[in-house]
Amino acid sequence: MVTKIEILKVLREDVTKPIFDFDLFKLMELDKKDSDEFLEMLDELEAEGKVLKTKKDKYGIPERFGLVSGKVQVTKKGFAFLLSEEAGVSDTFIPAAELNTAMNGDTVLVKLTKQPEDNRRGEGKVERVIKRAYDTIVGTFEASKDYGFVVADDKKMGRDFYIGKKDTKGAESGDKVVVKIIKYSEQNRNPEGKIIDILGKAGTHEAEIQSIIKMHGLPEAFPKKVLRQADRIDTSISQEEIDRRKDFRNDLVVTIDGADAKDLDDAISISKLDNGHYELGVHIADVTHYVQERSKLDVEALKRGTSVYLVDRVIPMLPKVLSNGICSLNPHEDRLTMSIVMEINEHGKVINQQIYESIINSNERLTYTDVSDILEDNLEGKDLSKYDYLNETFIYMRDLAAILRKSREMRGMIDFNFPEAKVVTDEEGLVTDIVIRESRVSNKIIEEFMLKANETIAEYMYWLELPFVYRVHENPTEEKIAEFNKLIHNFGYTIKGNLEEIHPREIQKLLNQVEGKKEEALINKMMLRSLKQAKYSPFNDGHFGLAAQYYCHFTSPIRRYPDLQIHRIIKESLNGTIDKGRTDELDVIVANAAEQASKQERIAEKAERDTVDLKMAEYMSNYVGEEYDGIISSLTSFGIFVQLENTIEGLVRMVDLVDDYYIFDEANMLYIGEHTRKTYHIGDELRIRVENVSIKDREIDFTILEKKE
């Protein structure tokens, strides 16, 4: 079985000139049975811009032709940058006139016209569009007599889309619409499209939420064939199935989740052994028993990659008959699970572990609030005496979680501490409040237990040397840490040591220094922006933020595809069914799952942020003219961002600073008045007024009333 990595390796190291696909196939000494898969992977590599196909149908690596592959990131001003995944290739500037029909997000091949030098980026022009990022766009329709235009919600699209009179589908001015792109933009010509869906009037709740869903290509409804397969699943549990599993139904097992959670995919059991060690059981819904590999359900789950949690709805990875039904660990019901039982000593070290295909029957469906109230002795006005029989369990949970946390702190894990906004909506989805999300003692208990299970599973599987999907977080670049160091210098802090090989412990030292201070949230946020994003990978490259050598996602197979995939591998390993052929097959499967899940995770995160930004703008539209205290959260060439106590950010535009002409000193991250020498730094406290809110653009404008000294 062949992989994309192997194809690229041969093209880079063993091929000296463009080569036909059949010659490459022979060079790699592949079996005839692999030919279809080989050609499919070659096509995918071409679509990704990692391989170039010439007009004579020969293949080569783009850099051998003097080209760089990557994705175009278009700015609101029209020019763009090429973002390449190639090692050592910096971002390349592309003038608007050199985009050659490329639009934001497109995968392209770029020819360098100016080499990078000193601190200046290289410059290039798009030679070929390899893959379009979008074949549809979402925007607001504006009608005229004989035609219309759609203004895209994504401002990086740069141009409005021309809609011919016959292609308006009856849309009226102000309608939020979905447009099928017919013709991509050319020099001095707008792109063309036809309206295929009308979402409602711009500015209304459902139309705006639907526009975000459509813009990110999120699949709301499941295909009928997937739903039919889900409905046909046998939810009964045979005695034969029970007999082959570890039976935990007589153990004290509970779930702890949010009060409104419907998909309960993790449960815990805990006891104290005679030697003083703890025995912690983490029991996870066995989704793979119901979702078979390559089934319609499995293919759809991989396509979605993750459940998406928008402010007013969830777009699930699996149909609700599974996620809220037979795979949800509801109390007093037999449920099939995958369990890891760990013996943990007083230092938080796992002494022994056992992994089982199992069955449980949860005793209680507990909530974070109730468990926290019990452990924090906050029972005023509440009667939780029905849980008295669990008091010893709660104490064990609290004590073990404290041990595990101390162990992680000692090895240097990073513990970000900044407020997270929670949008409160009514039944119609309209925002009623923006509050700070609570993280109490029970939330932290479950977090510690899930982290320990994930780490233990990852290490166990690593030493088995089987294909696996790891959760990795690469070390930050020296440049990013140096840039962050310059920013925090304004607050009187610095990260010391070798910035090229920074240890997470040094970052945590800084976060401890700022704890409880006014700049804490800002420095936490700036630090987070300086780190790379975690991703899924078939390679165990460690997790920088957790200071963990081994890490994976095992605990949420209802809502994350990598968890689902590694459950299959674990089960096959336990049953001894992985031979050489299956190992080769799994190599391809896990690489594909890691790549797809990482991509879908980014899309989900962006969609979730967009709906939060929408609701924040909607909320603040009720408070135009009101005054608040805030703190400068970031500075840009076009204005000052100010964050309020409820985490909402607004922009003070440079043109609205009317008491002087201000210069943006990017090197020192400050604004300075030409005549008054008045300065604005990150972290400065301000009194602001809400000046204007655009729900459509999800933008909030502030005016500075006073700088607090």
Image (tube, rainbow, N blue to C red):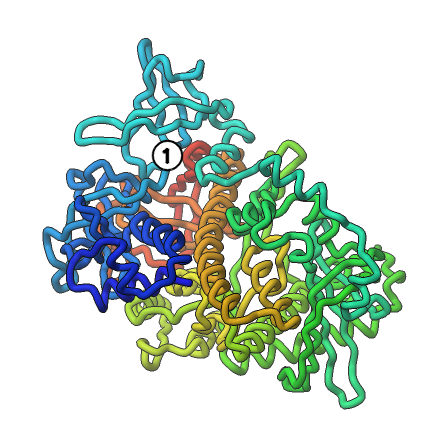
- Where residue 23 sits in the image (x, y, percent)? 24, 58
- Where residue 560 sits in the image (x, y, percent)? 57, 55
Quadrant in which the C terminus is drawn: bottom left
Quadrant in which the N terminus is drawn: bottom left
Relative to the observer, which residue lies in front, 607 or 630?
607
Residue visible at 28% across and 39% down? 103
Quick one: which residue is furthest to the front in this view? 32
Look at the image and tell me whether residue 424 can be seen. yes
Relative to the observer, which residue lies in front, 466 or 701?
466
Displayed quadrant of residue 24: bottom left
**Which residue position holds label 1?**
135
Relative to the observer, which residue lies in front, 443 or 525?
443
Look at the image and tell me whether residue 518 can be seen. no
Quick one: which residue is furthest to the bottom in this view? 275
- Where residue 361 sits in the image (x, y, percent)? 82, 61
User: What is the tally of numbered marks visible in this picture?
Assistant: 1
SS of the residue at dot 1?
loop
Quick one: which residue is furthest to the left in this view? 114
